[in-house]
Structure formats: C-alpha cells, structure tokens
Amino acid sequence: EWLIPNWIPAKKLTLIGAEGGTGKTNIWCSILGSLSRGEPCFFEDPATFEKRKPMRSIILSSEDEFAEIIVPRLKKVNADLSMISGMEFTNPLFDEIKINSQTFEKMIHDYKPALVILDPYQSFMPFDANLNAQNQVRACLNPLMRIGMETGTTFIFTMHTNKDRDAYGRGRLSGSTDTYDFSRSVFLIGKSKNGQLYLDHAKSNYGPTQKTVLFDLPDGVPTFVGTTEKKDWDFVH
C-alpha cells in the first residue's frame, strides 16, 4: 500500500535527510498541503496521478513554532488547515511525546491521521537512547512500525545530512545506520554546486527508486523544475 504511489509507502517510516537551507520544512509542508486537498505532490507526475481522498496529518516539530512559522508555510501551499493538527513545542505536554510513550501512542490511536511528521526525529527518541547504537535505534523505532500497522498511519521523520563529501547514501546521515536501514523510503535533499535544489529518492524497499527531482523554492513554495538520473553522490562531488 502507498501513501504516495512509488514514493512513500503507507503505514511505514520514510526518512527525509536534508542539508541546511534546502527547504526541508517547505518540502514536508508541501506534501501535507497536497494530501490535505487530495491533490498530487509537486514531485508526482500529473499524467499518472490517480485521484485520492483528502488526508489528515499531525505535525510534531521541535525546530519551528507551529502557529508562527509552520502555519504560514502551510498557507503558502494552499493547505486545508482543517485537515492538519499540530502542537507548539512550548506546550508542557510536548516533552512527553516520545515514540515509545503512551502519550504519543494514544494521540495516534485517537486521531488516526494518515501521516505524522516528526521533525527532527532525534527530538522524539527516548531521553536515554544512544542514537549511535544500532540495537537501541532499531528498538526505539519498532513502536512506529507497530502503531502504523494498527492505525494505518504513515510516519515521516527528518534529520540533517552531514558534510562528509566522501559519503553517500546512508553515510550522509549522522548516527546509527539503522536509521537509514529501518526506513522503507529515503529522500536526500541538497543543493548542487550551481545552486540547483534536488530531491534524490535514495532508497525504496517496495519498488524502484524514482528519478531525482529538481526544484526551486519561489517564495518558499517547492516548484517542479525537471528530473535527472543524477543522485546525491553526483551532486556533492
């Protein structure tokens, strides 16, 4: 089953890794906006798009204020705000939201959203988790897989890529490689040497990876430019 055919599998985990300043938040706001209206995302091919029902989402971000920063970005992409919920990270309850907590699980079971954003995912790992330890990371992420199967919810979690120019694929992400391995789909977002923004579909467990999408961000709105066979490795070398 797919949340977004060939890109994001339903009920599973998708990882977005991004360089700073490449529009990570704008990307997932655009995805949520499209899903809230039942319309194609900017990277989907309109010619093959099949009609979908509007979907509900929850945003959990410890990096940006929901009302002040995220809602204006959602408005720019014409999101149906009645389909999107969020919580300010200044809310005392926010600190209780860890992916292995009863508070988090109850939230998902009560609302049953189609999609939940965890930005960045490190903020929602247990306080005592060693993010460099493979067994610990996998054990921490297991609840998301179970909750996804129980509720039909898909999870997108984000993290920054590192500056290692000799790395590629999962080596571009900090911490345990289990973060990359456990994800069923992975996007790497970056900027080429000439300033072109790109979205590399770096991993897909349930089908072939799609072509890398080139995009611009006029006024913070992701806009399709074209596609290329180049991958993240090609752009950073």
Image (spheres, grey):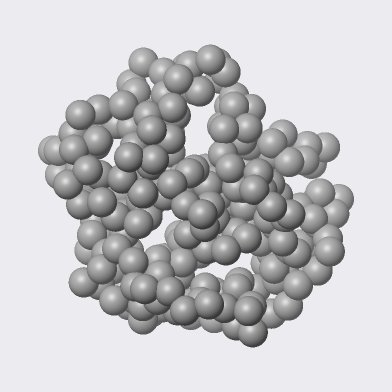
Image position, residue 237 (x, y; %):
86, 50
Q: Examine the image and state in which quarter residue 85 appears.
A: bottom left
Q: Is residue 78 above or below residue 161?
A: below
Q: In this rendering, does residue 68 appear at all?
A: no
Image position, residue 204 (x, y; %):
66, 48
Q: Is residue 228 above or below residue 16?
A: below
Residue beneath the point at 36% across and 78% down: 37
Foreground residue, 153 or 43? 153
Residue beneath the point at 24% across and 36% down: 104
Image position, residue 54 (x, y; %):
34, 73
Q: Examine the image and state in which quarter residue 128 appears.
A: top left
Residue beneath the point at 54% across and 45% down: 15
Residue that sits furthest to the bottom in the current view: 47
Q: Count the numbered circles shown.
A: 0
Q: Examine the image and state in which quarter residue 215 appears.
A: bottom right
Foreground residue, 159 or 35? 35
Residue that sits furthest to the left in the current view: 92
Q: Is residue 108 above or below residue 58?
A: above
Horizontally, residue 31 falls left or right of residue 177, namely left
Residue beneath the point at 29% across and 55% down: 113
Q: In this rendering, does residue 206 appear at all?
A: yes
Foreground residue, 15 or 161? 15
Image position, residue 9 (x, y; %):
53, 52
Q: Is residue 99 above or below residue 22?
A: above
